[in-house]
Amino acid sequence: MRVVIMGCGRVGSRLAMLLDQEGHQVTVIDINSDSFRRLGRDFKGQAMVGNGIDQDVLRKAGIEEADAFVVVTQGDNRNVMAAQIAKHIFHVPKVVVRIYDPIREEMYHQLGLDTYSPTKVAAESLRQQLLGEGEKK
């Protein structure tokens, strides 16, 4: 599978390494070249400095041949914009976008984006721990 990941922070770099180890073709885009140090020496994919809302940058990253696009930068606005570009302009089959704000995440999910909100996931996990639900046996 060909995957383009926008954002090489903790989550993006970890996902890139996991997919790379599984044999997928991975390209990571980040505006900060220092972020690529998180990928490690064994990473065989491509690391590219650029802004993932720039269509020329996305083309250079191989978005037109990508099977999936994952957006995990720190900015919800930029994430949503990049996801919409990938889905509606480049017609990438699988687009997943991280959105911190649960209200916005729900709205964009209802508009057809495949969304993920770590805020909602963490709150639910903490709730389960507090109430003793889902404890390991």
Image (cartoon, grey):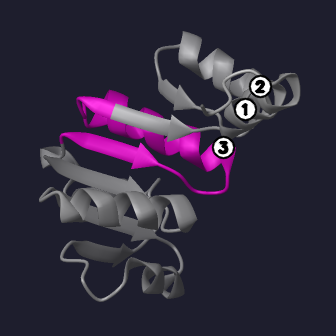
* Circle 3 residues within 10 Å: few <14, some 14–19, many ≥20: few
Amino acid bearing label 1? Ser
Q: Give the image location of residue 93, x and y in percent.
A: 23, 29
Question: Residue 125 bears which disc, if any?
Answer: 1
Q: Please, which residue is most extreme toward the front here? A: 137
Q: Is residue 67 visible?
A: yes
Q: Give the image location of residue 136, x and y in percent.
A: 62, 34
Please name the residue that numbered disc 3 is placed on: 77
- Element type at mark 2: helix
**Magenta-tinted stretch:** 67-94
User: Mark 2 or 3 closer to N-term?
Assistant: 3
Check the image and report above or below for 121 versus 63: above
Question: Residue 90 bears which disc, if any?
Answer: none
Check the image and report above or below for 104 versus 70: above
Please name the residue that numbered disc 2 is placed on: 128
Amino acid bearing label 3? Asn
Q: Please, which residue is most extreme toward the top here? A: 110
- Element type at mark 3: helix
Check the image and report above or below for 137 versus 8: above
Between marks 1 and 3, how big is the CA–CA gap? 26 Å
Q: Is residue 56 visible?
A: no
Q: Residue at x 22, y 64 (%)?
A: 20
Residue 115 in the magenta stretch? The answer is no
Q: Do residues under tags 1 and 2 come within 8 Å of each other at their CB atoms?
A: yes
